[in-house]
Amino acid sequence: GAVVSQHPSWVICKSGTSVKIECRSLDFQATTMFWYRQFPKQSLMLMATSNEGSKATYEQGVEKDKFLINHASLTLSTLTVTSAHPEDSSFYICSARGAGGSDEQFFGPGTRLTVL
Amino acid sequence: GQNIDQPTEMTATEGAIVQINCTYQTSGFNGLFWYQQHAGEAPTFLSYNVLDGLEEKGRFSSFLSRSKGYSYLLLKELQMKDSASYLCAAQDSNYQLIWGAGTKLIIKP
């Protein structure tokens, strides 16, 4: 099956620093990538949808200047959490969907961010 | 609005059968997914239904009724490793996933 990787798996950073999370589709071209955030004991929350070569579409309440998304190629999307604060600590998960809108989404393993 | 409802928690016995229900309301419909998520891990894909009926895949089966906006996930011969959260997600007309809050399944010996 299709594989999506994320790097890093976990990261601990100081408040005020920026953190970049990479999401890669390893064996297929992902025309669309999704970024989710999950707080403990809560459902996945969609943060933004990105299509290769165009600006990401952010969900209501998600600050686009704080969560920078770049989908520069068909196999790579990055999420940068700028000026991270402790409340940004969460589990960030990306998923990728190939060409053809009805394809299932393949999830990355997730990145656990802890901001001290 | 768009909405997904599923029970918060269920308990079942090892070796038994359990059915997890999910009802949905979406703007358009392009299929329904079931995912399994163990604590601290990303969800893993279990099933996808877009046509009415039952899809069987080993110990797991998934059912869909589009007219009723209803789906269920059926788990047979439960094993302790099946203890996890089960997420129901409906795909809307824009192919975005609308997620339920998940059902925590507790398996007892």
Image (spheres, coloured by chain):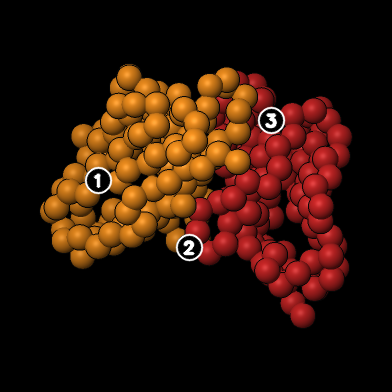
Chain colours: A orange, B red
The residue at the far left in this view is A16
**Disc 1: host chain:** A
**Mark 2–mark 1 distance (CA, rounded to whole Å):** 20 Å
x and y, in percent, of residue A101 in the image:
57, 21
Q: Residues within 10 Å of mark 3 (few under 14, many from 20)?
A: many
Query: Which residue appears at 25% of the width and 35% of the height?
Result: A68
**Mark 2–mark 3 distance (CA, rounded to whole Å):** 26 Å
Q: Say which label, 2 or 3, has the lower sequence index.
A: 3
Q: Residues within 10 Å of mark 1 (few under 14, many from 20)?
A: some
Q: Residues within 10 Å of mark 2 (few under 14, many from 20)?
A: some
Marks 2 & 3 on one chain:
yes
Amino acid at pointer 1: Lys
**Mark 1–mark 3 distance (CA, rounded to whole Å):** 32 Å
Dot label at residue B31:
3
Location of mark 2 (residue): B40
x and y, in percent, of residue A72 in the image:
30, 27
**Disc 3: host chain:** B
